Image: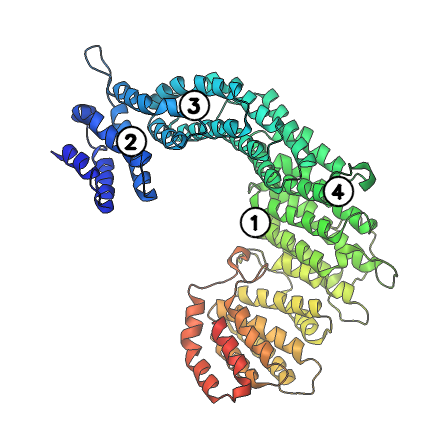
Amino acid sequence: FLLPLIIEKLDSEVQSAKLDSLQTLAACVGQYEHKDLAEFLEGLWSSLRREVFQTSSEKIEVAALTALTALTSCLSRSVLNSDSEDSLSTFLDLVLRDCKHHLFEPDLKLVWPSAKLLQAACSASYRAGHILTTTVMPPLVEQYSSRTECSHRRTLLEVVQRFIQSTASCQSVDHDESLFSAYKQSLCSMVFSGLSESNSSLQITATSVLTSLAQQTGLLLDSDVELAVDHLTRLLLTDEDDRVSLAVVECAGALAEQYPSAFITKLIPTLKKEMFSDQREVSELHSHHAVRQRCLSALAAVSIRASVVQESTPVLLDLLSSAHTDHTRFSVDEVVHACRSLQKIAEQVQDDEETSHCFHDIIIPRLLSLALQAALQSEGSSGRSSPLLEEVVLSAVVSVISTACSRLQTTFAEQMASRAVSLFLDGDVSFLPDNSFPSHIQLLQQQEESWRQSQLVCLLMACVCSLPRIVEIPQVERLLSQLEELSCRCSHPLSYTSAAKCFAGLINKKPQGSSLDSLIQRTIKRVSSELDRPSSPLRTQAFTLLIWVAKALLLRYHPLFSVLTDKLFSLLDDADLGLMAADGFLLLMSDSANVLNRDCHADVRIMYRQRFFSENSAKLVQGFNAAPQGRRLESCKVDSST
């Protein structure tokens, strides 16, 4: 009774009735046996086909395809014997009869509905996939070879790609071989032909198919992978279309995860040679800067396996070293891009002891060493300085170190904490490479003309504030004392802001207790003494420390946060700090990078924003109503922030 009713309801003009019927069909066939469906197959297929061929709603189309997959899956469960009809083959014959011929008309609109129907059936089971691919793939390959128009070839490649993707979920545990193994040579030829064309859309589609081939076992031989790497490398170095570059980089990343050796031996050496070549050696048709940017993106994308990371990161570090020693060879943008590539590698690389060792013992010490060299060599020098002194570059280095430290295994994290604290408190440079630094470096001491050194406190923040909370920071009381002093006394904005952020990051993770409470109270007293003196030249520094400590306490629900909140409200009508105080509420409500966020293992309680608003909304309204007309801008900014 039910199946005829469903077929009848699918003829309805009411969209909700169609959707309900399709969802009911998908649910039912999960329980039915193939013999229950036999007499209704033609009627069900006719209705499902119509909803895809003549669809007016994406929801209806998706539901119809889902129902088709479920129906095919049900038929696939039938047990064949000499006396029974093969229900699956009978049903798929109907599907092929109505859909197959449309695939070979790539300029007509029924190509895609037909492909979707075939692919929905194909994804139902290994058996269904085998029947359909055996029938469809040979003529598809033949059609691609006979077509000359790029648009037709692209359509055929897209159809093939969707077939490959649709079978990925139905690979049988009893069948190690891919359904496309018999066609792998033809598929590779189609892909390499597409990559060799000058049509951007065809090239992009070819990279997508190549990615799909790489994700199924056994479809790419070693020789195919090497040829693929050659094609991808050529496109990276010569094709200026941003869409093609993005597709190539994504494809390279997918292939490198499965076939790292080809990228280690072929791609990385070629990209290194290109990046370090002089501009005059590059064809005038291509921007040397753009080529370098593409190379940097590709190096990051392929660095997922530890074996690749060990080859790619030295190239990036060599670029930073070269930029430091020869200030004109690489632009600041290129240096920043190299750091972003290192950060991406730190984010995506497989989390194991080998990669922790690489970042802990090689990458982070090398970055610290380069930054320290830049700070020391530039003291008193004239002319163009190292790009590693630029705030935008230091910020990028901070992101690399912060991301890497947040993922270090516990043993390496504890060693990193000890190394970083010893470097910044005691000038211990023994773990740094190229160790030719003077003794008794004092990086946290505020001295005349020492901003180049004091701004390196941002790197200390990156090292110690991103570590897991279980890692104990050595000499933490002494470290906090010097950070507080630097944040309150230094006149260099990056230095005192970074010191305040580092102080706050440590406060946020410090265990609850009288020691923490005493430290916060002392800090509040010191900050208030500066803020309460309108003539003090250090009010901006004191406010910066106030707002970052306030954020550290807000995130962890510390009760002393309310004292800082009251102080912040009192500053809204301050002639000099009113606008900064209003902006401070935005800082409290926003996620911050590299410190005081969940990725950095900060103590962040749920719904802290809502709690702040519920406790302070009355103060906001009261302050707005009481403020004179000319001072209401600050209150409006606070309202919008919260």
- Alpha carbon of mark 1 to alpha carbon of mark 2: how far? 50 Å
Circles 1 and 2: CB atoms closer than 8 Å = no
Position of residue 500 relative to residue 39, above or below, is below
Closer to viewer: mark 1 or mark 2: 2
Q: Earlier in the sequence, mark 1 or mark 2?
A: 2
- Looking at numbered disc 1 in the image, what kind of residue is underneath it? Arg
Dot 3 crowding, Cα within 10 Å, few <14, some 14–19, many 20+? some
Task: Kindly identify which numbered label has been placed on residue 104.
Answer: 3
- What residue would you read off at disc 2? 49
- Alpha carbon of mark 1 to alpha carbon of mark 4: how far? 34 Å
Q: Residue at x 59, y 81 (%)?
A: 578
Q: What element carries label 1?
A: loop
- Looking at numbered disc 3 in the image, what kind of residue is underneath it? Phe
- What residue would you read off at disc 4? 288
Q: Earlier in the sequence, mark 3 or mark 1?
A: 3
Image x and y of residue 278, in percent:
81, 40
Q: Earlier in the sequence, mark 3 or mark 4?
A: 3
Image-quadrant location for residue 605: bottom left
- Looking at numbered disc 2 in the image, what kind of residue is underneath it? Arg
- Looking at numbered disc 4 in the image, what kind of residue is underneath it? His
Q: What element carries label 3?
A: helix
Image x and y of residue 281, in percent:
81, 36
Closer to viewer: mark 1 or mark 4: 4
Dot 2 crowding, Cα within 10 Å, few <14, some 14–19, many 20+? many
Q: What element carries label 4?
A: helix
Q: Earlier in the sequence, mark 1 or mark 4?
A: 4
- What residue would you read off at disc 1? 407
- Alpha carbon of mark 4 to alpha carbon of mark 2: how far? 53 Å
Q: What element carries label 2?
A: helix
Dot 1 crowding, Cα within 10 Å, few <14, some 14–19, many 20+? many
- Alpha carbon of mark 3 to alpha carbon of mark 4: how far? 43 Å
